[in-house]
Amino acid sequence: MKILVIEDEAGLRDAVMESLRQAGYLADGTGDGKTGLDMIRSGLYDLVILDVILPEIGGFDVLAIARKLHVTIPIMLVTALSQLEDKIEGMDSGADDYITKPFEMQELLARIRMVTRRQRAKDERNENLLKAGDLVLNILTFQMGCRSNRRTVQLAKKEYHMLEYLMTNRGQVLTREQITLRVWGYESETEYNNVDVYISYLRKKMKYVKTHANISTVRGVGYRLEEGSPDD
């Protein structure tokens, strides 16, 4: 799961991102609303932690614009404002939750878990599993498996995040650039050929569990996860 932190206080932003990473999430961050809105629109994130008071575009406006653009991922507001009217404005603009500064990191993590549980229920994800044909991915244990034979294999963290991205967008072509940004982040110096290496790792593990799903190469562009069938 990848989380975007939009917070203009650099120290707090870095602390939140570090706590998220220690908790097993991928995290990117920015300090202004305009850049944050562009990052939200990229489609790379599963949840946004959004400060209300921001340069360029305020948090309430970022939230309202995102919802008008039909961005449906959970957005949590974080602000020093504690007045009831501010909370009401945030919820009416489409926020999924609201936390007031100062806050403990453990409370923030608990609220993230609460919001993501709600989102998973909306997405009808059963038993914490992502499914693509007979391929399954446990989002809690990072295990890949095959429903038809119940074979499983453990994935490393980057393998998991890459497969999660492919499965969530199954049938769609994802470029190497998109995958790199999703898994390694904007500030990473990772080369695009690292994507090819991890795709190779995933293919070997998919072969091991004997799933009919496969990752196809779209020459010169990127990769696509296909569900496959028993007759393939």
Image (cartoon, rainbow, N blue to C red):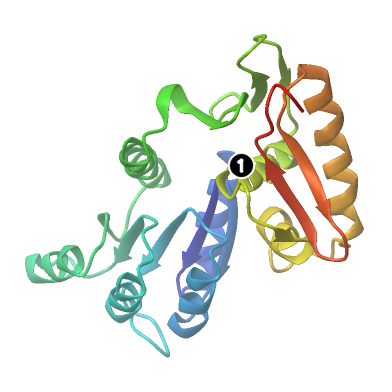
Quadrant that contains the N terminus:
top right
Q: Furthest-left residue in view? A: 84
In front: 72, or 15?
72
In front: 213, or 53?
213
Q: Furthest-front residue in view? A: 231
Residue at left offset 66%, top offset 57%: 182
174, above or below 143, in the image: below
In the shown orientation, is residue 172 left or right of residue 103? right
Percent position of residue 153, x then y: 74, 19
In front: 8, or 201?
201
Percent position of residue 120, x then y: 38, 38
Q: Secondary structure at mark 1?
A: helix
Percent position of residue 142, x then y: 63, 28
Residue at left offset 11%, top offset 65%: 88
Q: Which residue is mark 1?
A: 167
Whether residue 95 appears in this view of the structure is yes
In front: 34, or 227?
227
Disc 1 residue type (three-letter): Met
Percent position of residue 228, x then y: 69, 33
Other-residue count near label 1 (Cα within 10 Å), few / some / many at <14 / 14–19 / ≥20: many
Residue at left offset 31%, top offset 41%: 122
Whether residue 12 appears in this view of the structure is no
In the shown orientation, is residue 208 left or right of residue 137? right
Numbered label tally: 1
Quadrant that contains the C terminus:
top right
